[in-house]
Amino acid sequence: MKTIQIEVVGTGCATCQQLHEITKSVAAEIGPEANVTYLSNQDGMKRLMELGLMQSPALVVNGKVAMVGYSPSTQKIKALILENV
């Protein structure tokens, strides 16, 4: 399997941080090919603008927006990552 680049993009708020934690655990289940980057504060705001998004957090897989907003469901996040590979 090729490398999966996963970005959690947000403002640094609590829900952004929670999504990052869930995404890290999901990436660990997927395997070493799943790399998670967390962009927050200024970097996060800049990336949200680049993606044309007005709300956060966002889950981006290989450059494609997979989800905007927050879901605490690890299964949903895992499915979104795998269907966007």
Image (cartoon, helix red, strand yellow):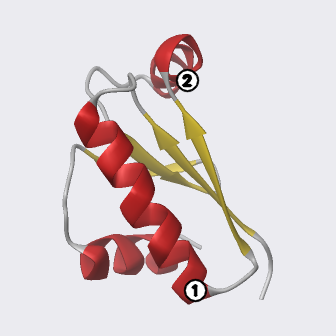
Position above or below: 69 against 28 = above
> What whole-number distance in Å separates the C-alpha atoms at marks 1 and 2?
25 Å
Q: Residue at x 19, y 58 (%)?
A: 71
Q: Are marks 1 and 2 in contact (CB under 8 Å)?
A: no
- What is the residue that sits farthest to the right in this orientation? 2
Judged by depth in the image, the label closer to the viewer, 1 or 2, is: 1
Q: Residue 82 at what x, y percent from top left?
A: 49, 80
Residue bearing mark 2: 47
> Mark 2: few, some, or many residues within 10 Å (few <14, many ≥20)?
some
Residue 74 is left or right of residue 51, and the answer is left
Q: Residue at x 53, y 51 (%)?
A: 64
Q: Which residue is drawn at 54% across and 10% down?
A: 42
Q: Residue at x 59, y 73 (%)?
A: 85
Q: Is residue 67 visible?
A: no
Give amino acid for label 1.
Ile
Badge 2 marks a residue whose secondary structure is: helix
Badge 1 marks a residue whose secondary structure is: helix
Residue bearing mark 1: 30
